[in-house]
Amino acid sequence: MATQKRRTLAEAVAHAEHVLKQKDKLREEAFRDSREIQRAASGVLRAGLPKGKAALAQAHEQLALASAHSKALERRLVEHPELYESGMLETPLQELAEAYVLLAYAAGESIPTFDEINVTPSAFLLGVADAIGEFRRQLVDSIRHGAIREAERYLDAMEEAFDAVAGISLPDAISPIRKKVDGARSLLERSRGEIALAVRMHEHEAAIRGAAAQTRARKSSAKQRQGARK
């Protein structure tokens, strides 16, 4: 009976090195996929809430492609879940979740769950919290253009997103959501004040325009009476 060859230390080290090199190769591939995910999600976020069917369809296509990259990445890393759930993918997946929330809001669609869009649970929660900042950006832009009702809709969206995440109590090691909730609370309070101020200014300007219109009407009526007497 043949005796089993004694494994040397060099052979054991070489085996461990081979496994780690394979893992490093997967990590590099994950980086490439994560850049594609982030590029698609960032493109949607930079464009803001899509207006019109064509813009909405294009945004849906971009995010579907990003989700496909994430799903493929998850399959490749099935034996290395620590890579998929690591910090290197958190930001791209977080932006993907945020973009999906914004798109669902713009289209009046149901909000997807984290597994439907192929992101981690933590990335989804962080993406919802970040969506509050994007809604605020749209709110400020609406106020700047005098669209007060539209701004109020964005405030409603901010409040809905904040209420959804404000009660979450998780340790930072699981999901660093608390810091984002604190930041979102500050944004929400500031936005409420800006909306209230914008409404008052809008009412004041409307009152001024109304008074000016009445003055013009009185002057016109007086001129007509003077003309009639002549």
Image: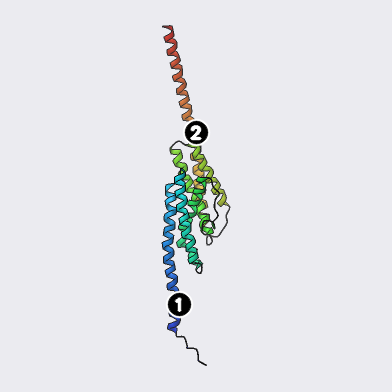
User: For the C terminus, which image quadrant?
Assistant: top left
23 to 185, vertically: above or below: below
Q: For this rendering, which residue is in front, 52 or 129?
A: 52
Q: Which residue is mark 2?
A: 200
Q: Secondary structure at mark 2?
A: helix
**Is disc 2 in contact with disc 1, using a CB cutoff of under 8 Å?**
no
Disc sitting over residue 16 in the figure: 1
Q: Tell me which label, 2 or 1, sits earlier in the chain.
A: 1
Residue 157 position, x and y percent, is 53, 45
Disc sitting over residue 100 in the figure: none
- Residue at screen point 48% across, 58% down: 68
Residue 163 position, x and y percent, is 57, 48
Quadrant assignment, res 15: bottom left
Q: Amino acid at mark 1?
A: Ala
Q: Residues within 10 Å of mark 2 (few under 14, many from 20)?
A: few
201 to 70, vertically: above or below: above
- Residue at screen point 48% across, 30% down: 204
Can residue 73 be seen from the camera position used here?
yes
- Residue at screen point 44% across, 73% down: 20
Q: Amino acid at mark 2?
A: Arg
36 to 4, vertically: above or below: above
Q: Secondary structure at mark 1?
A: helix
